[in-house]
Structure formats: C-alpha cells, structure tokens
Amino acid sequence: METTPEKPAALVNVATHLRTMARIHPYKRAVVCPCGRDSQGRVAYTHLTFRQLDIESDCLAQGLDQRGVSRGVRTILMVRPSLDFFALVFALFKVGAVPVVVDPGMGVSRMLNCLKESQAQALVGIPPAHVLRTLAPGYFNSVKTFITVGRRWFWGGATLREVRSRHWEPYRMADTRVDEIAAILFTTGSTGPAKGVYYTHGVFDAQVRSIRAQFGITPEEIDLPTFPLFALFDPALGMTAIIPDMDPTKPAHVNPERIIEAIVNHGVTNMFASPALLDRVGRYGKGKGIKLPTLRRVISAGAPATPANIEQFCAMLTEGAQIYTGYGATEAMPVSAFDSDAILKETRKLSEQGYGMCVGKPVAGIDVRIIRISDGPIARWTDDLRLPDGEIGEISVRGDQVTRS
C-alpha cells in the first residue's frame, strides 16, 4: 500500500516582516527612544528607520552567528527597551536563535527561576544582568556564551560592540519552519507560577496578521507600547514604536506627564496600556482637561479594565476613538476584543450589577468552546467535553495564534 509523503512544514521567519518594511518604507522611523533632556527640560530622541533597523540587525546577526549564537540556540535577552533591544531581537530571529524574554515585573526571585528553567545556552544582557549571573551562578549553569550590552566590568565574555560586524551585507536569514520555535516568553503568571510559552515563527506571524486585521492597523501609524513584549510587534506591523520614558516594571506609578508628552510630541495614534497605567494617566488627564486628538485607539490588557476606568480615559479622546479590552493570554493572544462604546453603552450596567466583565466576541480565526471544568490534563479532545449554551465552564480556544506548548 502506497503512503502519501508528509507535506513539509511551510517556511516562515517573522523577521521577513521587517525586511519587507525596509524595502517599502526605508526612511520611515521604526523605533524612537528618549535619550535625555536639555537645560529647559525638553526631551531629546534618537531613532532608527526601518532600513537602519534592518541593516543593524543584519550586522548583529552576522556577529552573533560567528560567536555561536546560531539556529536553535536559546538566548536569554535582558536588555531594556531601546534601539539595541529591537536590533537584537530581530538579529536573533534572523539567525534562527530562540530569545528567552522574561517580564521584569515579576521580581528577581521568580525571574531567576524562569531563567534556570529555560536551560538557555547564551546570555545577552546589560551590565546589571551580568552582575546578577555572577552573584547567582547556579541559575545560569547551562549558559556558555556571554555578551554584554554596554560596558563590561569584571566578568568575561564579549561586548555587543565587539560582536557587531563592521561590514554590512544583507544577512541570509534562517529558513525557519512555521512550527519552529522563535522565542520563549515568560510573563508574570498572575494565575499561578510563571510559565514559559513556546512561540513559533508561525504563531508570531498569525498574531501579526490577526492584530492588524482586528484593529485595522495601517503602516502609517505610530504606537506607544508601554509593555515591552508588545513593542516587538510594531516593526512587523509597520508601525513606528515610540519607547515611553517610564519604568515598565511599575506601570501603576508611571509619570502621566511623560506618557502624555510622548503622545503629543509624536502624534501617537495607537497605545497599548495596562489598566493600572490607564487609570493613572486617565485620572491626571481628565483632571487637567487634556485632549489627545491624534490617539485613535487604546488597547488595554493584562487585567480587567473597569467601565469607570475606561470612561475616565475616554474623556481625553476625540469622537470615534476607542479603547479596546478583551481576553487573551501569553499563550493565546488575541482571543476576543471589545470596544469602549459597547462597554459603556451596553454592558456597563450589567457589570455593575454583578454580572461580571464581558470580554466581547472572538476575533476572526479563533474557535472558542466552553468545556467542563476539570483540574486534570485533557489527554484527548472529544465533543462530549463541550457544555450547552448557558452553562459555566472553562474556555478552550483553537487557532493559528494559539501556542502549542
């Protein structure tokens, strides 16, 4: 009996989105970072265009590859949101390495446990990251390659300046498969211990397509991503990323003037913000009577945003602008979305009567089922797991942007 040969997995590398933007919009700003203030307190910025970011990541990819940070090598990335952060992430994607990124908001102890669990072979980090690994070497036993972003002090390894190739030529990026691991992401784990989620190149690609379609994002837009992991999507979406002047580990204590300053200075059209940041900036802006006419949409996630919080921030927006909330997780994002008009006009009164928070409708391409609640693993899917309409159960989802492990 003849067997049909298995179809090979499709090839996809998320870094191709950056190369496409570098070809179509070479001189558009890709990443903008604050770099200080003058004697009058005016903020100064530095930036990379899409062409510059593509070239810079090529030079880093060439150097990383030569240092053994190549396809499949798990690489802890401990770099603050910056031009180097973006260039490094796309360099690692290009070589096919696997960046391991941990949400810094979880605290040092939990972060060290996550890094140990990742079993990474390389570490690329700023000086405090290397101080940490010298003070707690047991958590970095698997790491053999060390690269310092900035000044190297008493520890070994190379610096990023030494790694970066001085001669640019287009780097031939790895022909990664759709199901090949692209990154391992650890977020705060508010529902339990932080879990390392395997992101494949296919999942990243599906998320880019889903976010673009769901929210109508276009390449001329300017984003203010106040959560570092979401900043990674901007170059792939073709948006200019404005790195905010804030401590990303403490969104509830952000200086609202700095956030509003960035929006006004750059004509920001899109902002990603946690409900805590939304509340702090919204309270300040409403009290001062501030309007943000360029802001078309705010996407809030990470925790439920109350109707009162949404209404407060809406006072700064013009007619037609929306705040979107929804449902999702690091391992499945986005699952559903909901706009502020519907929340404030339709579901608010029910939420305030104790009916819970509505999370909207599933986004296109996501299949949602409500199943029986169980504490054990589900070894095999069967249709009798599903509950009839109106029953309370667990949410299960399926789609291209859902991670497999």
Image (cartoon, rainbow, N blue to C red):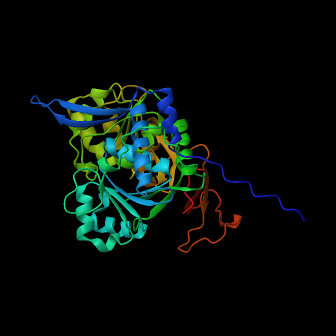
In this view, the residue in front, 96 or 112, is 96
Q: Quadrant of residue 388?
A: bottom right
Q: Is residue 249 left or right of residue 191?
A: left
Task: Residue at 74%, 54% (x, y): give it.
Answer: 7
Q: Is residue 241 visible?
A: yes
Task: Residue at 46%, 33% (x, y): give it.
Answer: 238
For the N terminus, the image quarter is: bottom right
Q: Is residue 219 left or right of residue 290?
A: right
Residue lying furthest front: 167
Q: Is residue 321 left or right of residue 176?
A: left
For the C terminus, the image quarter is: bottom right
Where residue 259 appears, x then y in whole percent? Answer: 26, 37
Residue 342 drawn above or below residue 97:
above
Q: Is residue 291 visible?
A: no
Residue lying furthest right: 1
Where residue 50 appears, x then y in whole percent? Answer: 42, 32
Where residue 250 appears, x then y in whole percent? Answer: 25, 52
Q: How many marks?
A: 0
Q: Is residue 295 left or right of residue 135?
A: right
Where residue 353 appears, x then y in whole percent? Answer: 41, 51
